[in-house]
Amino acid sequence: MSIAQIRLDNRQAEGLAQDAARPDVAGGTVWLDVYPPTEDDLAWLARTYGFHPLTLEDCRHFNQRAKAELYDGYLFLSVTMTARADGELRAQEMEAFLGPDYLITVHREPLRAIDTVRERCLPNARADLVLYLLIDQMADAYFPLLDEMEDEIDALEDEILENATQATMHQIFALKQQLVFLRKITSPMRDVVNALAGTRYALIDASTALYFRDVYDHFTRIYDLVETSRDLLGNALDAYLSTVSNRLNEVMKRLTLFTAVFMPISFLVGFGGINFQQMPFDNAIVFTLLLALLVLLPSAMLVWFWRSRWI
Protein backbone atom coordinates (compact mmCIF):
# COMPACT_ATOMS: atom_id res chain seq x y z
CA MET A 1 0.00 0.00 0.00
CA SER A 2 1.02 3.63 -0.50
CA ILE A 3 -0.76 5.02 2.56
CA ALA A 4 1.49 6.75 5.08
CA GLN A 5 0.44 7.90 8.52
CA ILE A 6 2.08 11.22 9.30
CA ARG A 7 2.61 11.50 13.04
CA LEU A 8 2.30 15.10 14.13
CA ASP A 9 4.21 14.51 17.36
CA ASN A 10 7.46 13.58 15.62
CA ARG A 11 6.68 14.59 12.00
CA GLN A 12 7.52 11.10 10.74
CA ALA A 13 5.63 9.15 8.09
CA GLU A 14 4.91 5.49 8.75
CA GLY A 15 3.51 3.19 6.07
CA LEU A 16 0.37 1.20 6.81
CA ALA A 17 -0.02 -2.47 6.02
CA GLN A 18 -2.76 -3.64 3.69
CA ASP A 19 -4.67 -5.26 6.55
CA ALA A 20 -4.12 -2.36 8.96
CA ALA A 21 -6.98 -1.24 11.13
CA ARG A 22 -8.19 2.32 11.41
CA PRO A 23 -5.48 4.36 13.15
CA ASP A 24 -6.32 5.77 16.54
CA VAL A 25 -4.27 8.39 18.35
CA ALA A 26 -6.43 8.59 21.49
CA GLY A 27 -8.10 11.95 21.09
CA GLY A 28 -5.51 13.42 18.73
CA THR A 29 -5.48 13.87 14.96
CA VAL A 30 -4.70 11.23 12.34
CA TRP A 31 -3.21 12.44 9.08
CA LEU A 32 -3.00 9.85 6.33
CA ASP A 33 -1.27 10.70 3.07
CA VAL A 34 -2.07 8.49 0.06
CA TYR A 35 0.51 8.83 -2.71
CA PRO A 36 0.04 7.59 -5.36
CA PRO A 37 -3.37 6.01 -4.81
CA THR A 38 -3.91 2.42 -5.95
CA GLU A 39 -7.07 0.38 -6.12
CA ASP A 40 -6.03 -1.41 -2.92
CA ASP A 41 -5.61 1.95 -1.20
CA LEU A 42 -9.04 3.16 -2.25
CA ALA A 43 -10.59 -0.16 -1.27
CA TRP A 44 -8.97 0.14 2.17
CA LEU A 45 -10.35 3.66 2.58
CA ALA A 46 -13.82 2.53 1.58
CA ARG A 47 -13.69 -0.43 3.93
CA THR A 48 -12.13 1.40 6.87
CA TYR A 49 -13.81 4.81 6.73
CA GLY A 50 -16.93 4.07 4.68
CA PHE A 51 -16.35 6.88 2.19
CA HIS A 52 -18.95 7.43 -0.51
CA PRO A 53 -18.14 5.80 -3.89
CA LEU A 54 -18.43 9.15 -5.65
CA THR A 55 -15.60 10.63 -3.60
CA LEU A 56 -13.40 7.60 -4.22
CA GLU A 57 -14.19 7.88 -7.93
CA ASP A 58 -12.83 11.43 -7.88
CA CYS A 59 -9.63 10.06 -6.35
CA ARG A 60 -9.23 7.74 -9.33
CA HIS A 61 -9.46 10.32 -12.11
CA PHE A 62 -7.96 13.55 -10.66
CA ASN A 63 -9.71 15.79 -13.13
CA GLN A 64 -12.01 17.67 -10.83
CA ARG A 65 -12.95 21.28 -10.42
CA ALA A 66 -12.10 22.64 -6.98
CA LYS A 67 -15.04 21.90 -4.69
CA ALA A 68 -16.15 21.15 -1.14
CA GLU A 69 -18.91 18.59 -0.52
CA LEU A 70 -20.37 17.54 2.81
CA TYR A 71 -21.07 13.83 3.33
CA ASP A 72 -22.20 11.83 6.31
CA GLY A 73 -19.56 12.41 8.96
CA TYR A 74 -16.86 13.96 6.79
CA LEU A 75 -16.10 16.78 4.36
CA PHE A 76 -14.67 15.97 0.95
CA LEU A 77 -12.57 18.56 -0.84
CA SER A 78 -10.87 18.78 -4.19
CA VAL A 79 -8.21 21.51 -4.27
CA THR A 80 -5.82 22.47 -7.05
CA MET A 81 -2.56 24.34 -7.29
CA THR A 82 -0.39 25.15 -10.30
CA ALA A 83 3.22 24.33 -11.05
CA ARG A 84 5.32 25.67 -13.91
CA ALA A 85 8.08 23.78 -15.65
CA ASP A 86 9.86 24.77 -18.88
CA GLY A 87 7.40 27.61 -19.37
CA GLU A 88 4.37 25.30 -19.26
CA LEU A 89 1.71 25.27 -16.57
CA ARG A 90 0.21 22.09 -15.16
CA ALA A 91 -2.35 21.53 -12.46
CA GLN A 92 -1.50 19.64 -9.28
CA GLU A 93 -4.66 18.27 -7.73
CA MET A 94 -5.22 16.97 -4.22
CA GLU A 95 -8.30 15.33 -2.77
CA ALA A 96 -8.90 15.56 0.97
CA PHE A 97 -11.21 13.85 3.45
CA LEU A 98 -11.74 15.90 6.59
CA GLY A 99 -13.28 14.19 9.60
CA PRO A 100 -13.64 15.10 13.27
CA ASP A 101 -10.29 13.53 14.17
CA TYR A 102 -8.63 12.72 10.85
CA LEU A 103 -7.42 14.23 7.62
CA ILE A 104 -6.73 12.05 4.58
CA THR A 105 -4.95 13.57 1.60
CA VAL A 106 -4.81 11.83 -1.78
CA HIS A 107 -2.57 13.01 -4.60
CA ARG A 108 -1.00 11.53 -7.70
CA GLU A 109 2.32 13.38 -7.70
CA PRO A 110 4.63 14.79 -5.03
CA LEU A 111 3.41 18.03 -3.48
CA ARG A 112 5.78 20.45 -1.82
CA ALA A 113 2.95 21.65 0.41
CA ILE A 114 2.75 18.22 2.06
CA ASP A 115 6.41 18.27 3.10
CA THR A 116 6.26 21.91 4.19
CA VAL A 117 3.19 21.45 6.36
CA ARG A 118 4.62 18.32 7.94
CA GLU A 119 7.56 20.39 9.16
CA ARG A 120 5.36 23.24 10.39
CA CYS A 121 2.55 21.28 12.05
CA LEU A 122 2.14 21.40 15.79
CA PRO A 123 1.89 18.06 17.61
CA ASN A 124 -1.63 18.79 18.87
CA ALA A 125 -2.94 20.41 15.67
CA ARG A 126 -6.54 19.71 14.77
CA ALA A 127 -7.43 18.20 11.42
CA ASP A 128 -9.06 21.38 10.11
CA LEU A 129 -5.95 23.36 11.05
CA VAL A 130 -3.74 20.95 9.08
CA LEU A 131 -6.09 21.41 6.12
CA TYR A 132 -5.74 25.18 6.46
CA LEU A 133 -1.95 24.93 6.42
CA LEU A 134 -2.06 22.82 3.24
CA ILE A 135 -4.36 25.21 1.37
CA ASP A 136 -2.38 28.20 2.64
CA GLN A 137 0.81 26.71 1.21
CA MET A 138 -0.95 26.16 -2.10
CA ALA A 139 -2.08 29.79 -2.15
CA ASP A 140 1.41 31.09 -1.35
CA ALA A 141 2.85 29.15 -4.30
CA TYR A 142 0.89 31.33 -6.74
CA PHE A 143 2.63 34.60 -5.87
CA PRO A 144 6.15 33.80 -7.16
CA LEU A 145 4.53 32.28 -10.25
CA LEU A 146 2.56 35.44 -10.95
CA ASP A 147 5.64 37.60 -10.29
CA GLU A 148 7.55 35.56 -12.85
CA MET A 149 4.79 35.97 -15.42
CA GLU A 150 4.60 39.70 -14.72
CA ASP A 151 8.34 40.02 -15.37
CA GLU A 152 7.84 38.21 -18.68
CA ILE A 153 5.07 40.64 -19.61
CA ASP A 154 7.36 43.60 -18.82
CA ALA A 155 10.09 42.06 -20.97
CA LEU A 156 7.58 41.60 -23.80
CA GLU A 157 6.54 45.24 -23.58
CA ASP A 158 10.18 46.34 -23.90
CA GLU A 159 10.70 43.96 -26.81
CA ILE A 160 7.60 45.30 -28.56
CA LEU A 161 8.90 48.86 -28.35
CA GLU A 162 12.41 47.93 -29.48
CA ASN A 163 12.09 45.12 -32.02
CA ALA A 164 8.83 43.20 -32.23
CA THR A 165 8.99 39.97 -34.21
CA GLN A 166 6.66 37.11 -35.01
CA ALA A 167 8.05 35.23 -32.01
CA THR A 168 6.86 38.09 -29.79
CA MET A 169 3.28 37.48 -30.83
CA HIS A 170 3.65 33.75 -30.14
CA GLN A 171 4.89 34.53 -26.61
CA ILE A 172 1.95 36.87 -26.03
CA PHE A 173 -0.60 34.22 -27.01
CA ALA A 174 1.21 31.57 -24.95
CA LEU A 175 1.03 33.78 -21.86
CA LYS A 176 -2.63 34.55 -22.55
CA GLN A 177 -3.41 30.83 -22.56
CA GLN A 178 -1.55 30.35 -19.29
CA LEU A 179 -3.43 33.21 -17.64
CA VAL A 180 -6.75 31.76 -18.79
CA PHE A 181 -5.62 28.45 -17.30
CA LEU A 182 -4.80 30.16 -13.99
CA ARG A 183 -8.16 31.90 -13.98
CA LYS A 184 -9.99 28.60 -14.40
CA ILE A 185 -8.16 27.20 -11.37
CA THR A 186 -8.12 30.16 -8.99
CA SER A 187 -11.77 31.12 -9.42
CA PRO A 188 -13.25 27.86 -8.00
CA MET A 189 -10.48 27.70 -5.39
CA ARG A 190 -11.56 31.11 -4.14
CA ASP A 191 -15.14 29.88 -3.83
CA VAL A 192 -14.06 26.78 -1.91
CA VAL A 193 -11.99 28.78 0.58
CA ASN A 194 -14.83 31.24 0.98
CA ALA A 195 -17.11 28.37 1.94
CA LEU A 196 -14.56 27.06 4.45
CA ALA A 197 -14.21 30.54 5.95
CA GLY A 198 -17.91 30.72 6.76
CA THR A 199 -20.04 28.81 9.22
CA ARG A 200 -21.40 26.36 6.67
CA TYR A 201 -19.47 23.32 7.86
CA ALA A 202 -19.44 22.17 11.48
CA LEU A 203 -16.16 20.32 10.91
CA ILE A 204 -14.39 23.68 10.53
CA ASP A 205 -13.85 25.24 13.92
CA ALA A 206 -14.68 28.93 14.30
CA SER A 207 -11.09 29.75 15.21
CA THR A 208 -9.82 27.97 12.07
CA ALA A 209 -12.42 29.72 9.92
CA LEU A 210 -10.67 32.99 10.73
CA TYR A 211 -7.49 31.62 9.15
CA PHE A 212 -9.44 30.50 6.10
CA ARG A 213 -10.64 34.08 5.72
CA ASP A 214 -7.02 35.10 5.40
CA VAL A 215 -6.50 32.46 2.71
CA TYR A 216 -9.62 33.75 0.98
CA ASP A 217 -8.03 37.20 0.89
CA HIS A 218 -4.95 35.61 -0.68
CA PHE A 219 -6.99 33.96 -3.41
CA THR A 220 -8.91 37.16 -4.03
CA ARG A 221 -5.62 38.96 -4.49
CA ILE A 222 -4.35 36.15 -6.72
CA TYR A 223 -7.45 36.38 -8.87
CA ASP A 224 -7.05 40.16 -9.14
CA LEU A 225 -3.39 39.71 -10.13
CA VAL A 226 -4.40 37.26 -12.84
CA GLU A 227 -6.96 39.72 -14.19
CA THR A 228 -4.42 42.55 -14.05
CA SER A 229 -1.87 40.46 -15.93
CA ARG A 230 -4.49 39.61 -18.55
CA ASP A 231 -5.21 43.33 -19.01
CA LEU A 232 -1.50 44.12 -19.29
CA LEU A 233 -1.05 41.34 -21.81
CA GLY A 234 -4.03 42.62 -23.79
CA ASN A 235 -2.43 46.06 -23.85
CA ALA A 236 0.84 44.48 -24.94
CA LEU A 237 -0.95 42.75 -27.82
CA ASP A 238 -2.56 46.03 -28.86
CA ALA A 239 0.84 47.71 -28.72
CA TYR A 240 2.33 44.93 -30.85
CA LEU A 241 -0.40 45.28 -33.47
CA SER A 242 0.01 49.06 -33.45
CA THR A 243 3.77 48.73 -33.84
CA VAL A 244 3.40 46.34 -36.76
CA SER A 245 0.81 48.63 -38.34
CA ASN A 246 3.03 51.70 -37.90
CA ARG A 247 5.97 49.81 -39.34
CA LEU A 248 3.87 48.87 -42.37
CA ASN A 249 2.75 52.48 -42.75
CA GLU A 250 6.37 53.62 -42.71
CA VAL A 251 7.25 51.13 -45.41
CA MET A 252 4.27 52.19 -47.53
CA LYS A 253 5.16 55.85 -47.04
CA ARG A 254 8.73 55.31 -48.21
CA LEU A 255 7.59 53.31 -51.20
CA THR A 256 5.09 56.06 -52.06
CA LEU A 257 7.79 58.74 -51.82
CA PHE A 258 10.11 56.60 -53.92
CA THR A 259 7.40 56.28 -56.55
CA ALA A 260 6.62 60.01 -56.40
CA VAL A 261 10.29 60.90 -56.96
CA PHE A 262 10.70 58.64 -59.98
CA MET A 263 7.35 59.47 -61.55
CA PRO A 264 8.46 62.80 -63.10
CA ILE A 265 11.74 61.20 -64.17
CA SER A 266 9.85 58.50 -66.00
CA PHE A 267 7.62 61.13 -67.61
CA LEU A 268 10.54 63.27 -68.77
CA VAL A 269 12.48 60.31 -70.13
CA GLY A 270 9.41 59.00 -71.90
CA PHE A 271 8.49 62.41 -73.26
CA GLY A 272 12.02 63.06 -74.43
CA GLY A 273 12.20 59.72 -76.17
CA ILE A 274 9.08 60.21 -78.29
CA ASN A 275 9.90 60.01 -81.99
CA PHE A 276 9.46 63.67 -83.01
CA GLN A 277 11.07 65.17 -86.06
CA GLN A 278 13.77 66.73 -83.90
CA MET A 279 14.91 64.43 -81.11
CA PRO A 280 16.42 66.05 -78.01
CA PHE A 281 19.71 64.41 -78.83
CA ASP A 282 19.83 66.46 -82.06
CA ASN A 283 19.61 69.74 -80.15
CA ALA A 284 22.22 70.34 -77.48
CA ILE A 285 20.15 72.99 -75.68
CA VAL A 286 17.05 70.85 -75.43
CA PHE A 287 19.13 67.85 -74.38
CA THR A 288 20.88 69.89 -71.67
CA LEU A 289 17.56 71.25 -70.46
CA LEU A 290 16.14 67.74 -70.27
CA LEU A 291 19.13 66.50 -68.25
CA ALA A 292 18.82 69.49 -65.91
CA LEU A 293 15.15 68.73 -65.33
CA LEU A 294 15.99 65.07 -64.63
CA VAL A 295 18.32 66.20 -61.86
CA LEU A 296 16.65 69.32 -60.47
CA LEU A 297 13.04 68.13 -60.36
CA PRO A 298 13.69 65.03 -58.17
CA SER A 299 16.08 67.05 -56.00
CA ALA A 300 13.47 69.72 -55.49
CA MET A 301 10.89 67.08 -54.58
CA LEU A 302 13.24 65.50 -52.04
CA VAL A 303 13.89 68.91 -50.46
CA TRP A 304 10.17 69.54 -50.28
CA PHE A 305 9.53 66.14 -48.69
CA TRP A 306 12.28 66.75 -46.15
CA ARG A 307 11.01 70.22 -45.21
CA SER A 308 7.52 68.77 -44.86
CA ARG A 309 9.02 66.09 -42.53
CA TRP A 310 7.77 63.27 -44.68
CA ILE A 311 11.26 61.74 -44.75
Image (cartoon, rainbow, N blue to C red):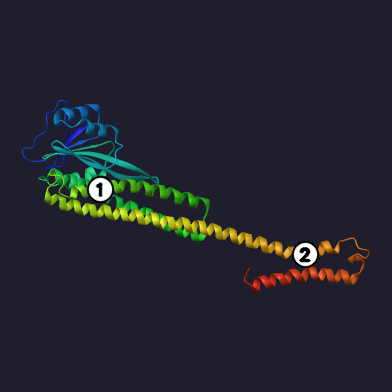
Residue 298: x %, y % from top left: 74, 68
* Figure check: 217 above or below 6: below
Q: Residues within 10 Å of mark 2 (few under 14, many from 20)?
A: some
The three-letter code of the residue at mark 2 reads Ile
Which image quarter: residue 60? top left
Residue, far right: 277
Could you tell me which secondary element the residue under label 2 belongs to? helix
For image coordinates 66% across by 60% down, the residue present is 255
The three-letter code of the residue at mark 1 reads Asp
3D distance between C-alphas at marks 2 and 1:
73 Å
Give the residue pinned by disc 1: 191
Q: Which mark is residue 173?
A: none
* Figure check: 67 above or below 302: above
The answer to whether residue 159 is seen in the rendering is no
Q: Residues within 10 Å of mark 1 (few under 14, many from 20)?
A: some
242 relative position to 113: left or right = right
N-terminal label among 2 and 1: 1
Image quadrant holding the C terminus, namely bottom right
Which-is-in-front pick, marks 2 and 1?
Answer: 1
Give the residue pinned by disc 2: 265
Image quadrant holding the N terminus, namely top left
Residue 290: x %, y % from top left: 83, 69
